[in-house]
Amino acid sequence: MTKPQTDDLRWKLFETMLLMRRFEESVSRLNEQKHFTGHYHLYIGEEATGSAAMACLEPRDTITTTHRNHGHVIARGADPGAALAEILGRAGGLNGGRGGTIHLCDPALGFLSTSGIVGGSISMGSGGAFARKMKKDGSIHMAFFGDSALEEGVAFEALNIAALWKLPCVFLCENNSAEAWAPGSGGYTTLVHAAHDLRAIPAALGIPTTRVDGVDVDACHAAIMEGVARCRAGEGPVFIEAMTKRWAGSAPLWPELSTGVTDLRMATGEASTTGEHHAWFEHDDPVLRLARTLLAGAPANKARVFDMDARVRARMAEAEAFAIASPSPAAATLLDHVFA
Amino acid sequence: MSEHMSIAQALIAAIADAMAEDPMVCLLGSPLGLGPQRMLMNGLREAHPDRVLDPPTCEAGNAALGVGAAMGGARPFVDLSTGSFSFLAFSQIVNEAAVAHYMSNGKVRVPVTYHTLEGVRGGGAPQHSQNVHALFWNASGLEMLAPATPADMYGLARSAIASDNPTFIMGHAKLLGLEGPVPERKAVPIGKADIKRRGRDVTIVAIHLMVHPALAAAEALAKEGIDVEVVDPRTLAPLDEATILSSVAKTGRLVVVDEAPLQGSIASGIAGMVAERGFHSLKAPIQRVARPDAPVAFAAGLEALLVPTAETIAAAVKRTLSTS
Ligand SMILES: Cc1ncc(C[n+]2csc(CCOP(=O)(O)OP(=O)(O)O)c2C)c(N)n1
Ligand SMILES: [Mg+2]
């Protein structure tokens, strides 16, 4: 089903994916430098899914997402400085430091909710789609969630409602459980489901389902575009399962930049990919994979790839400087916004 | 022009008027339970077949649907049926709807209204008799309303639907059929208590259904020369503390009445607030009249022993007068 994408789209997605990657590398570094504390989740390894999904949406569409939201928010166009400042809990953050890493949320970009409650984004997603349907303007909702969300009972309830009322919702399951470790071996919580094929759950309710390689940006874009078109046409919800290998750094209980800062020379053959993370560097890293596609048979593209990365890194350096310089929220604001 | 309505009629009138004014108002479920009042829904269904929906039996899913729809620009009124069932929607209300505005730094608004028929309804046994307002009262960011009369139900339901905050209307199963005047179809402001009866000697603060036995107790005590003031907070969150404190400043005596179990009840919360902030006005210990901390028995004789009555309220008023 993979349709060849235009080069323009690939370049656009590549730039977005690079920004998502460099953003997470900054987050990891700032955490190591103790600029913020608390648990957090990185989107590394899922950039192809998130960037393709955002490219399928229109500005008027709405989104709900989860604890693993950084990539979604960046891909949709949030200011990286404000997003980073939020992760640091600063006044200049996207949400004034009240939400932090788990709750980056910008309604101006269509984000309705970024919930850290597993199952939250899928359940409120049906609600978001309900509002889109009431607007009767062809806009749709996209709910991002991890594979574990389908363990929560409310996920079934939300899928049932969406199916019954033909709500325009793209349920986008980012399944990163392959390669995950169970908590018993020191890993982060992962899929514990009797259903080995998660598509069976929405399928039981008559929701059309697709599974796609979540590392292949062309495949993601084609599959998600098809689902989006169905929803927009008023045919009801769709369920898309994007399969990614869990990035090694997201496997342990605490995220770590175990594969190092991404070295694009691995895509040109100028840097070695041998060692423990060989498979990641060669196949499972969506950024390197797309870089190889862009470079294949077009050596002239090399300068464009590296220039783009240099621009993205410069942008992230500015974002970091902004976030670090942003002050803590003023004590006098503590009780602001309890009520609207 | 004053109208005469039941609480059920007032609620439906409020929803109907709000739906007529705003095409983004919608109703999920039927807020009138399974009794005879449910027929009042028919007109609403006919007028707005697209906006009156019968959801599946899934309180969490329906509550979440309301949150997401509200965030997305709708103004959903979500009925959660019997109070006890709203526990299944606890996370969606407390951990999603109530916190979204704060944690987005004021960027996200959640104009959803929830409604439930809570309380000891007669033969409900433990699982269909829960008073849930006290448990939800602890959720910061949630407005909570407890109308006791048709006029307050109409006005507060209009304010709830118009509010940009998540709002929970605590209906009481035994109040649906209660009739009274609705002088004007007008919103009642959220956060404003109402003095249902003026008096000098003792303040009774009573919430929703309990307003009525409190007023009956006041009438009975008047015959004995005891002049009772009955304050109905109407809004439980945010609570109109000023009206309660100024009544206590006048009378020096306070009885607080709540049908919920005593521990953590609104009676306990208001007693604590007045003990702290109105201590110097008090001439006698505060009396709390609430349900004992026990599930609600099915047997009618046992059930009746659990709930506050005009008699137990009047006895509490007398205790505040004898201990001075
Ligand atoms: C209701 C609830 N239960 C438990 C948790 C703790 N928790 C946080 S993330 C997570 C696993 C989520 O897995 P998945 O949905 O697959 O997302 P991933 O982290 O793999 O992207 C759990 C159990 C939570 N946040 N919310
Ligand atoms: Mg997962």
Image (tube, coloured by chain):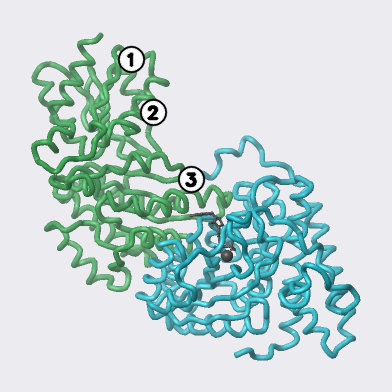
Chain colours: A cyan, B green
Tell me the SS state at disc 2. Answer: helix
Q: Quadrant of residue A303?
A: bottom right
Q: Which amino acid does label 1 sit on?
A: Leu
Marks 1 and 3 share the same chain: no
Quarter of the image that includes the N terminus of chain A:
bottom right
The answer to whether mark 2 and mark 3 are in CB contact below 8 A is no
Q: In which quarter of the image is ligand 2?
A: bottom right
Can residue B276 be seen here? The reply is yes
**Residue B247 versus residue B123 in the image, above or below:** above
Q: Which amino acid does label 2 sit on?
A: Ala
Residue A339's disc number = 3
Residue situated in front as seen by the camera: A168 or A275: A275
Please report, as a chain letter, where disc 2 is located: B
Residue B216 percent location from the top left of the image: 13, 30
Question: Badge 1 local density, few (<14 within 10 Å), some, or many (20+)?
Answer: some
Residue B54 percent location from the top left of the image: 28, 68
Horizontal side of residue B323 vs A233, given as left or right:
left
Residue situated in front as seen by the camera: A232 or A64: A64
Q: According to the image, label 1 marks what residue?
A: B282
Tell me the SS state at disc 1. Answer: loop
Q: In which quarter of the image is residue A204?
A: bottom left
The answer to whether mark 1 and mark 3 are in CB contact below 8 A is no
